[in-house]
Amino acid sequence: MSLRDRQRADTRQRIQRQALRLFSDQGYDATTVNEVADAAGVSAMTVYRNFPTKEDLVLYDDFDEQAAASIAELPSTGSLTDRIGRAVLATIERANTDLLLVRLQLMISTPALQARHLDSQFRLQEAFVQAICADDRTVEYAARAAASACLGVTHTALLRWAADNGKPNLPTLYSEAFTAVFGHAP
């Protein structure tokens, strides 16, 4: 990664962290993009260049890319649900849980973010399908069904974890939910 790319990533992280802090303190609807820009020490144009919509300040992450990369890195043994389950678990284990908790709590409590969250779930499903089908398009339908089932498990674990204010171990909750649905751990 070049210096310029690292600087862009640092700016993006700073903007998002300040936005999440302000949204948590003041409320999502009560916080303006200009306030986020001021808190991050950038212009409103820089905020919009990095996050095209206010919702993106909460919803943006690289979970899709990380999870898809995990599928490629992990052994392709077992069922499609097992492969996706292992990829999700590996990604959750690497996640910044403090940041994730704030984002989830905002998504759960803010109606404007709930619909957009469904869009992000669809993108994640597509990332899984594309990663699995990179070499074999004949499994696309099965991959889509497996990804949807695993995302349901993931959603259930994340909601429980956020409702408990991040106290339970997230990978353990995910494994328990996966086991409840599929009869074995990922």
Image: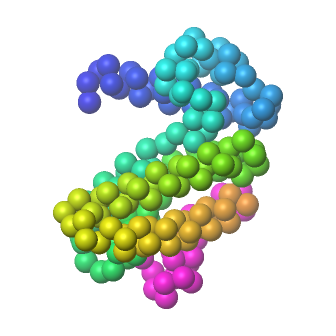
User: Looking at this rendering, what residue extends furthest in the left direction?
Assistant: 135
Whether residue 126 appears in magenta in the rendering, the answer is no
Q: Position of residue 75 (x, y in %)?
A: 24, 70
- Quadrant where the C terminus sits is bottom left
For the point 59% across and 29% down, the residue is: 53
Which one is in front, 50 or 38? 50
Residue at (38, 21) in percent of width and height: 7
Q: Residue 96: tell me if it is visible.
A: yes
Quick check: 173 above or below 51?
Answer: below
Q: Magenta region: which residues? A: 164-186
Residue in the picture at 66% in, 62% down: 159
Quarter of the image for residue 94 reads bottom left
Compared to residue 121, the image places residue 176 above or below, namely: below
Which quarter shows the N terminus? top left
In the depicted view, which residue is nearer to us: 23 or 130?
A: 130
Question: Which quadrant of the figure has residue 55?
Answer: top right
| Residue 168 appears in the picture as rendered | no
In the rendering, at what x and y percent does residue 5 appear? Answer: 33, 25
Q: Residue at x 30, y 58 (%)?
A: 131
How far across and how far down the image is residue 64, in percent? 42, 50
Q: Residue furthest bottom?
A: 183
Q: Is residue 54 left or right of residue 124?
A: right
Verify whether residue 167 appears in magenta: yes
Name the image colouring.
Answer: rainbow
Coordinates of residue 46 in the picture (x, y in percent): 52, 16
Above or below 175: residue 118: above
